[in-house]
Amino acid sequence: MSESKATQSIAQADLGKRVYTGSGKGAEKPLAGAWTEEEPYIAAPSLVDAVNTALYLRRPLLLEGEPGGGKTRLAFAVAYELGYPLHECYIRSTSRAQDLLYEYDALGRLYDIQEEKAGSGSAKPRKEYVNYGELGKAIKRSTEENSPSVVLIDEIDKADIDFPNDLLLELDRLKFQVKEVPEIEGINAFKPTGSSTEQTREQRRHHLPLIIITSNREKELPKPFLRRCLFYYINFPDDRTLKTILENRFIDPPEGSLALFQNIFLELRRPELNLRKTPGISEFLDWVTILLQKGQGAKIKALQSLTSQSKEQQLKAFAQIPHLEALIKTQSDRDTLFRISRGSGSTNG
Amino acid sequence: MADLTPDLNASLLALFEKLRRQDVPLGVSDYLDAIEAIQSGLGLENPDKFKQLLRLLWTKSREDQERFDGLFDNQFEQFFQAVEAPTPEVADVELPTPQGDDPPSRGTIPPIGITTQPLDPPVIPNPQPGQGESAEKVQKPTPLLAQPSKPAHRPAAQHYQFIPHFPISQRDMAGAWRQLRRPQRVGVPEELDVEATIASLARSGGLVSPVLRPRRRNLSRLVVLVDRQGSMTPFHPWIDAAMDSIKLGGLLGRVSFYYFHDCPETFLYRQPDLTGILRLETVLEEQVRGGSVLIISDAGAARGYFDSLRLSDTKAFLHKLQVQTYLYAWINPMPKQRWVATTAEDVACLVPMFPLDREGLNDAVNILRGQPFPVGVGLHEPN
């Protein structure tokens, strides 16, 4: 117990120094319960700055961008690099803001009371029936352990239109009350356990959770909600960054294969192709993973020989890309590619 | 903590005001956050980082970002020029001494608290007649010519903004649509009905089974009929934005759009270019039935005259419509004072018609939610 206290105070001393660098290296001294799964994530310098600004101001960071562009993965990378615990909230269309904070198992308690009356088992105290949600856990962690964390609220636009508005107070003030159990004191990240008064944001800065929210913009988020967020749009990476991403993720690939994959991918993303769903980075990485499995060498060679030919031949090659299913997700896009391949073939013949 | 130089503060405030005027949702706390971040040294490495910082803090969508880019470049171009190459004449005019204390390296924002230039940055390519010293004229072009070699600095250029600015922003329109809701409990019972459970407990003396109820869901359905082409052509971009705002308003999957020209008669169209023909009756029976209907059309107001044929056509359409639903409203992109003495004025007596502004949209949404029509408006009113 005393040992964990000691490590905690060390951690606190250096909390202020922790910044996100986007290098993908794990923290030297991860906090208790930190996210330790390695995340090879290459962030653009401006995104690194954005994360650090959000970290400094402790304001929620709202991320938009292409599907499969790394919005969600960023939270993992940030948690890993800062050595923070990670709380993931995946939003569904039926999610309510309340669910992120806590759920009170009234039903379980009722049953337990019934059983107690019948003479078997016993009802536990009320507060045992509170199940905290991920955001609730993060606020609790900050309040009770003085430990910061990363909270991921994924695809907030999927929820009902009330959802973001219902979260305003919790995101802003980082406090909530379990109203079913009055004896639990209000949980307030600005008022750590043992402190009698509420502290300022500046004093609490390094102990508050960092909230990362992603959106696909299926709905326009309400103005008051937007006002509280920092907004960052994750652009599609440029050629050099893409190359780094590949090199970072796939170690020791066959000579020249990564450049080849990248070319094919960029070719497939060309707007002239008019695909309904252009492949994103995550699909691309999946595809490369498949191709770099053992025993796929022949396919890579075939691909290499195809693309080394003339432009028309290259177009033709679309239909022969192995494991196209990893990149192209709709039948109509598949048809389009096959049509292009055939079209160029017929003009040749 | 050091204060910001008055001119940096003035420039920031000016930019902030301009963004607010462009309907970017910003409040005082956003401004204070920016100041706090700058004072803590964030974004001061070079002009580009500075821009990134403000962009992060003061924009809330990609469109905002585009607006921001133009405004920022206009606002801060001169500021950075003056800062990057502290020209002697500026120092001479304003402050002879502070310049000695370490002129900042190129491409750096000066340390906070040091005033390096007068409030109105006078460094513009054309020498001002007032400051007619010959040495000045020779020196002035130098910082401008040196620009291309500097990283992260754009040459002075005209900034164009291609984001259209409508009388009401898309965000505000989406906000109005968010109010369109008819929450009802439908579907699988999954939520514990505490009161009913307690009542059952009290009745039976023991817990038989908990009472569950379905969750509330928004059951609103909306059919939008949009007038295209002809007199509506100038409004197309605006109407497109309005339609996007409906799509983004949260009625996911329960909104459908159909198009017509001048007045919905026998047919509606599935595409905005008036192709994909459908029978009006079919749409009304299959899609409308009890749902809400919004009509977007100028109702002849843009033409500016009275057309009795159009009026009787519209009347016939409304008769067909009211068989299926009583939740319908009309949005007219022409301002209200232009409806006078046109077909629109008469149509506005038959159906609740509102201009496309904030109040108008809110009123229309209220009608679509089931509020009664305004007094004197309706098909069967004597008018």
Image (cartoon, coloured by chain):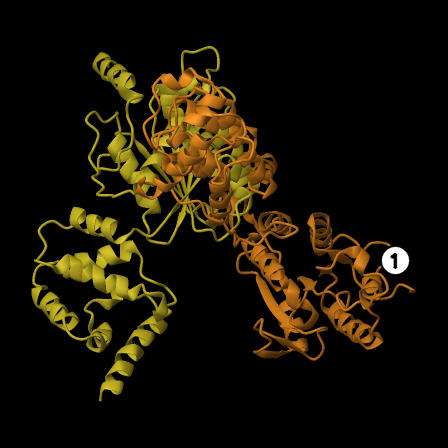
Chain colours: A yellow, B orange
Name the residue located 49 percent from the left edge and 49 percent from the top edge.
B158
Q: Which residue is mark 1?
A: B376
Percent across and percent down for residue B197 are 56, 39
Is A268 left or right of B32, judged from the image as shown?
left
Which residue is at the front of the view, B301 or A102?
A: B301
Percent across and percent down for residue B376 are 88, 58
The answer to whether residue A36 shows anywhere in this view is yes
Percent across and percent down for residue B189 are 52, 50
Which residue is at the front of the view, B177 or B347?
A: B347
Is B35 left or right of B280, judged from the image as shown?
left
Pick out the residue farthest to the right: B382
Is B215 left or right of A233, judged from the image as shown?
right
Pick out the residue farthest to the bottom: A349
Q: Quadrant of residue A10?
A: top left
Name the residue located 12 percent from the left edge and 68 percent from the top edge.
A304
Is B346 left or right of B135, judged from the image as shown?
right
The number of callouts visible is: 1
Quadrant of image for the N terminus of chain A: top left
Which residue is at the front of the view, A313 or B48?
A: B48
Q: Amino acid at mark 1?
A: Gly
| Up/down of B117 relative to B242, above or below | above
Percent across and percent down for residue B75 are 50, 38
The answer to whether residue A107 shows anywhere in this view is no
| Up/down of B157 relative to A175, above or below | below
| Up/down of B338 relative to B271, above or below | above
For disc 1, the neighbor class at 10 Å (few under 14, some 14 to 19, many from 20) is some
